[in-house]
Amino acid sequence: MREAYLDNSATTRCFPEVVELMSKIYLEEYGNPSSMHHKGVEAEKYITEAKRTLAQILKVNEKNLVFTSCGTESDNIAIIGGALANQRKGRHLITTSIEHPAVLEAMKYLESQDFEVTYLPVDQYGVVSPDAVEEAVREDTILVSIMHTNNEIGSVQPIEEIGRRIKRKNPACLFHVDAVQGFGKARIYPKKWGVDLLAVSGHKIHAPKGIGFLYIGDKVKVRNLIFGGGQQNGMRSGTENVAGIAAMGLAARILYQDFDKEMEKLYGLREMFIALVRDIPDVFVNGPKERLGAPHIISLTVPGVRAEVLLHALEGKGVYVSSGSACATNRPHLSGTLEAIRLPREFMDNTIRISLSGMNTEEDIRQASDALHEVVPFLRKYTRH
Ligand code: PLP
């Protein structure tokens, strides 16, 4: 059966060039970058090169990048490490109600350690108001964490404006951005935007799972959470994942090489999908309108059909999507994001996420639309009586 993989916000397929590079590193240039001999130097070169690429894309200095094991680890270091290093200035933090568990659970942990956290609401499109952020920032606020692109509905936050407002109200307050869904799908300039910390993950951009990085701005104090051999200036001990780092650098280079063309393609596929499913009775798309949101995420509510049932019915037609957010679906709770945009409760369990990558084709979109047209009336017949 032909497969249409439309769950790219859960994870992506690696670029073939990326796998080739990793294979070369694993089989030939497998040295430990801390080793002083030739094999170590060889490995170190891959790290330097990946740093150069990533730093150029973000327009930051190479020395401000720390490699981690994933987006979750980057978020944790930023939030917990940032809070611990700055707790003398205050114990108040701010975030939004639509963050990924990598941020929300780190915040919860800090609450258990006597920090205070303010959770800001979003509008019906999933966007937080810069006015509300500015208002919430206090003298004792030490860190604000706001995601760039939401993983469930694709809303994109006005990060530059928010950065400006935070610094205007309290220049010492740190600004962390979870850019796991935004990096590769948007141009992001942390230094220019007043962002102090920025989390990215490799497996969302056609690099493998198990690699990520954290941007830490100049003079930003963050306490390390991992103790050991002192690699990466002590910020993140542990032998570097050289193949993963090189892979993430190469994948980012490929994505940003033809960035405008890639974005045009993704928006085109997104619009094609929405146009094709519009004639299925009662279905609707959640989140940002037209091109105001991310190009790759579509949150679709299909009233009368349970998301999990729909997901498996589509799977039967070779179409892979997710119900809500795949990263959080092993926990049976209603989606915080859908609740935050005030989607009526009865629709929350009727919502699936379709997420695209540049590897998708119009044929994938047609296959998904055909499958939906076929299975939805059938499933509704079963559930509506
Ligand atoms: N933040 C967001 C917005 C995400 O979508 C995800 C994963 O889906 C993460 C963080 C966690 O990233 P990782 O899977 O690399 O730990």
Image: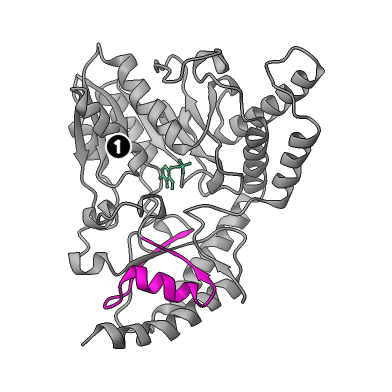
The part of the image, by quadrant, that contains residue 21 is top right
Residue 88, x across and y down, in percent: 25, 11
148 left or right, relative to 93:
right
Residue plotted at (24% across, 49% down): 122
Which color mode does the image show? Answer: one colour
Residue 283, x across and y down, in percent: 32, 76
Q: Please state which of residues 79 and 284 is positioned toward the viewer in this rendering.
A: 79
- Tell whether position 49 is magenta: no
102 left or right, relative to 183:
left
**Start-end of magenta stretch:** 296-323
Residue plotted at (54% across, 77% down): 367
Q: In the picture shown, does residue 72 fall above or below 302?
A: above
Residue 267, x across and y down, in percent: 51, 62
Q: In the picture shown, does residue 33 fall above or below 162?
A: above
Location of the C terminus by quadrant is bottom left
The part of the image, by quadrant, that contains residue 263 is bottom right
Q: Please state which of residues 292 and 107 is positioned toward the viewer in this rendering.
A: 107
For label 1, the crowd category at 10 Å Cα-Cα, with few meaning under 14, some 14 to 19 and many 20 or more, is few
What secondary structure is found at the residue carrying circle 1?
A: helix
- Tell whether position 307 is magenta: yes
81 left or right, relative to 96:
right
Q: Please state which of residues 191 and 360 is positioned toward the viewer in this rendering.
A: 360
Query: Which residue is disc 1 drawn over?
Result: 105
Residue plotted at (22% across, 53% down): 340
Q: In the picture shown, does residue 215 fall above or below 95?
A: above
> Which amino acid, by three-letter code, is at mark 1?
Glu
